[in-house]
Amino acid sequence: MQPLCLNSLLEIQAKQHPDAIAITAPERTPLKYHQLNQHIHQLVATLNICGVGRQDRVAIVLPNGPEMAVAFLAVTVAATSAPLNPAYRAEEFDFYLSDLNAKALIIQAGVAGPARTVAQARGIPIIELQPVLEAEAGIFTLIPTLTSGELNSSKYTSWTQPDDIALVLHTSGTTSRPKIVPLTQNNLCISAHNISSILELSEKDRCLNMMPLFHIHGLIGALLSSLSVGASVVCSLGFNASQFFQWLKIFGPTWYTAVPTMHQAILAHASNHHKIISDCQLRLIRSSSAALPPLVLTELETVFNAPVIEAYGMTEASHQMTSNPLPPRQRKLGSVGIAAGPEIAIMDEVGHLLSAETLGEIVIRGANVTSGYENNPSANQSAFTKGWFRTGDQGYLDSENYLFITGRLKEIINRGGEKISPREIDEALLEHPDILQAVAFAVPHPTLGEDLAAAVVLRDQATLTGPMIREFAFQQLADFKVPSEVVIVDEIPKGATGKLQRIGLAAKLVNQLQRDYVAPRNNLEMLITDIWAEILDIKTLGIHDNFFRLGGDSLRATRVISQLQAFFPIDIPIVTLFMKPTVAELSQLLATSINASDLSTISELVAELDELSDEEAKQLLDKA
């Protein structure tokens, strides 16, 4: 393909499909392609008068909707767009506006907020956007608070070029300082073409976009992919599961794209909308930005009678890297599909490309991939190897070049030397029909380094408990991959796009991971508590404390089992303690196997231990 820029792409569609609908929105008159093109020309002229031109960074802080979509298009044609999450706090806006070196900020007229306050404090010119609600969707006026710039310079009269930076976004920054990802006009246009090609989009299609337009998924995966072929986009005000079905009825979209949590919320409301679903015109459903649980994919296809196309994307690739193809081509459950734009390969730690079925780091290269992070040579040195961009994801290509992702490298949990991908744990737990969402995560451990826990959201009316979920996990996973603790929560924290957050989850759930103290209730629980206290060197522990969360490991578990077997002539497999990791659970299990005569001696033993000093009690238990 020849190098492209957005203004050329929009001009082409305005000539080829002038009266076709480009953008529409709830309770708004549709905006046609020739109107969109004319409006963008007017907006670019206004931005030029404000002193904004090629290579200038313009931050955009607007709610989702048609105005945000058109503002992004206009700024991207005139300069460099930098959309920011409107939900940021003042300190976040202060960081991003400073880091971007923003030339101006576009915000909605009459709306106060931290973005306005920070821009004023930093002396960043503010351009107010005033929607014209009686006009077509996306029509607005720009009201500058001041004008500046070299108004007669060619910088403010020429259109952007294919190699100009069109869009800058920051990485999530969950484990380090967010990095700036610059994407060129050509990056964006090539990526839009890749997505429209794999989904076979045409001017007959209509996308329902519910993704935020400050994120690469919504901007390229929904908006530009549609506009690049003369299709239309329904710009909702954001995701709303209860309104989703009315949007299906009113707008008749042929497809929508979303993250897994959105798909799950839609399915939760589906039973109330059989008529709308039976009449809907969905040709496909797309999922990206996070792993889609296989059960969710299957349920979506059953409910909507449409293929679900899972894609793999990231900001540094202008969104899409791989995608499952449409039927009749093969889609593989659990795979994110085949290369759909850039080249895909698997690389080892030292830069060697690996053969099929070999696990390693997923790497990409191609026309839609960023050339590097801005002003960050150290990050670029680690991110690029021999011209390949390292995604940070672990996976493998099968013999037919379908990509399977096994996890995020920085999320891999090292449990005493055993490397565990939490994504595998997620998928195993989600096999249970009563589990709606599951996220496995690392928790600190004094001897193992890291231990494994999981947060679970249950489906309505489900009555599962943590121990019941762990019992199910033992049927699905190798013993060392079963979480030591399962926390049932009402909601798992999500990022700005609705993606479930794994990093930092241990700190957020610290209160749920710490159980209230409950003293031993009988002699068997007292004996087990004494044994644990001696082996773990802990003064006080309760019957609901988790052996492994207290610092236990396989060696200490072996000592516990050895001492218990010295007192009771029964076979206790080592896995018993892994399956029943609290005093209460272990005691309940042992009580069913210990005969009455052995139970009667426990009270004497416990009484003897109580009378001894700590050192004498330790010697007695060690002797046992």
Image (tube, grey):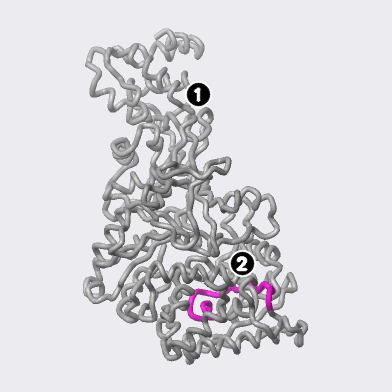
Q: Is residue 516 above or below residue 199?
A: above
Q: Nearer the viewer, residue 119 or 281?
A: 281
Q: Residues within 10 Å of mark 2 (few under 14, many from 20)?
A: many
Q: Secondary structure at mark 1?
A: loop
Residue at the location (51% across, 59% down)? 314
Amino acid type, callout 2: Val
Please state the horizontal and vertical placement of residue 60, each as a whole percent of the image: 60, 74
Q: Nearer the viewer, residue 381 or 421?
A: 381
Which numbered disc, 2 or 1, marks the residue that appears first in the sequence?
Answer: 2
Quarter of the rendering containing residue 253: bottom left
Residue 218's tag is none
Q: How many numbered marks have been drawn onto this rendered protein structure?
A: 2
Amino acid type, callout 1: Lys
Image quadrant occupied by the C terminus? top left
Q: What range is drawn magenta here?
A: 54-70
Q: CA distance from mark 2 to mark 1?
A: 55 Å
Q: Is residue 272 above or below residue 394?
A: below
Residue corresponding to mark 2: 168
Report the side of 82 relative to 609 (left or right).
right
- Does the magenta run of residues contain 61? yes
Q: Residues within 10 Å of mark 1 (few under 14, many from 20)?
A: few
Q: Nearer the viewer, residue 474 or 327?
A: 327
Residue 249 is at least partly visible in this image: yes
Q: Secondary structure at mark 2?
A: strand
Please state the horizontal and vertical placement of residue 324, each as a whole percent of the image: 37, 60
